[in-house]
Amino acid sequence: MNKRDFLKGAIVFFPAGAVLHALAREAGSAEKATTGSPTPGYDPTTHWYGMGVEVEKCIGCNRCAEACKAENDVPPEPFFFRTWVERYTVKPTGDTEVECISVNPREARKAQDEREVLRTFFVPKLCNHCARPPCVQVCPVGATFSTKDGVVLVDGQRCIGCRYCIQACPYGARFFNHRSNTADKCTFCYHRVVKGLLPACVEVCPTQARIFGDLKSRASRLVRFQRMNKLNVIKPALNTEPKVWYAQLDGEVR
Amino acid sequence: MKLPDQVTRIAVVTAVLLAVVLLLRFVVIPRSYFSTELHQSSTVRREVARPVAFAGAAVCGECHEDEWNRRRAGYHKGLACETCHGPSAKHADDPMSAKPFAPRDRKFCPVCHAYDAARPTGFPQINPDSHNPLKPCIACHDPHDPVPPETPQDCSACHAQIARTKALSAHALLPCITCHTVPQKHWTAPRSALPSKPQAREFCGQCHAQDASNPDAPKVDLAAHGGGFLCWQCHYPHMPEGRP
């Protein structure tokens, strides 16, 4: 290449760069146009959210899972859940049967023979909003992240739908939303929480088996729940530091 | 000292390349392409902008004062209105445009109150197949203040599982009040007045001690049998010697 060709190339290159720049600005304008706090009047650094579940209060009515679907526009098919309820049945033989009752909540469940049951109970499940979330670690494009107030969210515009996070979640809390073609999960009803409302599942729970609160506030119900109960989390050995605490949790619950 | 010509040239080329790279990185490519902070705040912004479907427990009482007060005094005091009536934020914003769901048939109440062994002990449960079939629940029970339409006459109305167990046991012929003193208030407000339970070994000894008058009951030597344990730590009184 001689000097003349180089300069000709440069004459083409710089306007092309300007066009690229304009396109890039256009594409990013949605994010650029809205500077400032995304949540006016609400400071996420002063909160740290979690949930408490009193297993013995759960009556397995499935109102939480239905409310979650109504609030968050979760696909209606009975295998997509942001929160769901499991029924554990421990047999005298030591076997444990787990059934997700949210799949078919209104169906009359066959009566169990009392002699076949050692103990049986319901366990509500949802995203644990881990303080050290494996799903965030594995996301190849940084689409999932923890907010400053401790909620794990998915950026639907950035998610490429690779499903790696769904595999990585040890709690099975994520699913693939076939409408948006992205990973989907519980947000602790972030849009309600920043407005001072409770998450929909907590709002409708008829027995107050679910307790939502802010660990940075001494007056929160969750802090009281943590003071008054012996607590456990699911799969503590994984060091994910879940923020959903269970009271009276049976050792069979996985 | 004069630098060699080729060094000067390569320095100029390097400087130009560096300038182009810096220009691309910081001017041409907008910040929104690589700033996680911007991505995250725009995700939060989208998340927060989503509509609310459940209005929350506080707003309903402003208009529906009667139902609100009745519910608050009864056994359903822990329920939010939207537990049964469904998401009602639209109705709260504009009461005339959207009416919330009102369950009136037999399908709804058993969602919570049908018998399931996994439900906690003491939670009121019925068998929908045998409990007044075909009658809607609200014909007898006010859902805002649910109580049985008449005072139950029999302990088994609520303690059905214990009654069934006891019916198969050696204690089948003993009425509940043999061992439990039931305050009158327990019939109408079960949790605010609890029946008594036996407190000491001597209570069982009234029938089972060697000098007891009851000829049918198996006899043990209270002083030697069972050491320091209370009778019901080994024998379940509603099914004293296990399953038949």
Image (spheres, coloured by chain):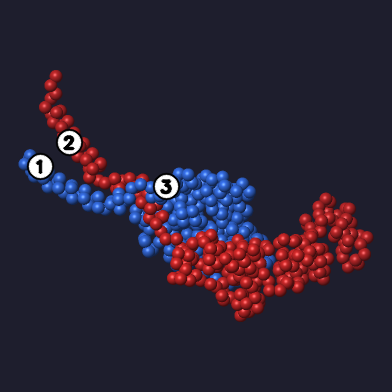
Chain colours: A blue, B red
Residue under label 1, please give it. A6
* Residue occupying image coordinates x 41% and y 59%: B50
Which amino acid type is marked by label 1?
Answer: Phe
User: Which residue: 42% across, 61% down?
Assistant: B51
Where is residue B203, by image quadrant?
Answer: bottom right
Q: In what element is the residue under mark 2?
A: helix
Q: How far across and down, in percent of the image, does residue A186 sit?
A: 46, 56
| Label located before the other in sequence (3 or 1) | 1
* Percent of width and height locating residue A64: 53, 62
Around disc 3, counting alpha carbons within 10 Å, would you say few (fewer than 14), some (14 to 19), or many (20 or more)? few
Question: In which quadrant of the rendered image does the N terminus of chain A lie?
Answer: top left
Asked which secondary structure carries label 3, the reply is helix
Q: Please, is residue B132 above or below residue A165 in the view?
A: below
Q: Is residue B35 left or right of residue B236?
A: left
Q: Relative to A222, is B90 above or below?
A: below
Q: Chain of mark 2?
A: B
Residue A135 — which label?
Answer: none
Asked if badges 1 and 2 are on one and the same chain, I answer no
- Chain identity of mark 1: A
Asked where in the image residue B168 lies, by quadrant, the reply is bottom right
Residue behind mark 3: A137
Foreground: disc 1 or disc 2? 2
SS label for mark 1: helix
Residue at (92% x, 62% y) in the render: B212
A249 horizontally vs B160: left or right:
left
Residue A51: x and y in percent read 54, 52
Q: Which numbered dot is residue B16?
A: 2
Numbered circles on residues, count? 3
Left or right: where A57 falls relative to A144: right
